[in-house]
Image (cartoon, rainbow, N blue to C red):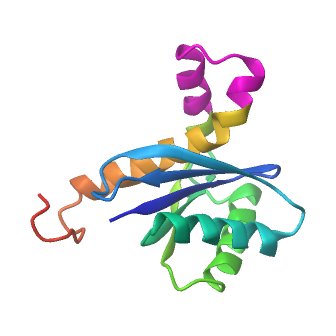
Amino acid sequence: MRALGVDLGSRRIGVALSNSAGTLATPYDTVERSGDVARDHRRLLELAAEAEVERIVVGLPLSLDGTVGPAAQGVLAEVEQLRSTTSLPVETYDERLTTVTADRLLRQGGRKGRARRKVVDQTAAAVLLQAWLDGRATDPTTERPSGTP
């Protein structure tokens, strides 16, 4: 199952894409916030259509103790707006520390300054989407296409 991972930021939206087998997430795109949430959502749905995804997974920035703070409340409200504009399933997934992890991976890979900032959001989206994919792979109750272990 192909999924689109989304990291909603205040200035940029990181986007990642899984392979068709639903086993590997890769950075895909960064959407600059336009100031118009509906326009931003249309762009996300264009990317979803181009990639022929079956599901959208949005990172939920829970507090470190796992509670829903102001940032998570804002994302949940935006997710509801996105759900109202698409027939695709839209779900949230805990994204705590994904941006920190993405930044560390990019630094280790030799990305510096501006080059790193250009891709950190889509890399964070890939980190969260990969965690979601891995969680599905280890959950025996998750439906998988026939022939998939």
**Could you tell me which residue is drawn at 65 percent across and 86 percent down?**
84
Determine which quarter of the picture holds residue 49: bottom right
**Could you tell me which residue is drawn at 82 percent across and 49 percent down?**
11
Q: Is residue 133 above or below residue 116?
A: below
**Could you tell me which residue is drawn at 61 percent across and 53 percent down?**
62
Quadrant of the snapshot with the C terminus = bottom left
- In the image, is residue 106 part of the stretch drawn in magenta? yes
**Could you tell me which residue is drawn at 55 percent across and 31 percent down?**
101
Q: Is residue 78 above or below residue 125?
A: below
Q: Is residue 100 above or below residue 127?
A: above
Q: Main secondary structure of the magenta part?
A: helix
- In the image, is residue 47 part of the stretch drawn in magenta? no
Q: In this rendering, would 103 be left or right of 141?
A: right
Quadrant of the snapshot with the N terminus = bottom left
> Bounds of the magenta span?
100-117
Report if residue 96 is visible in the image: no
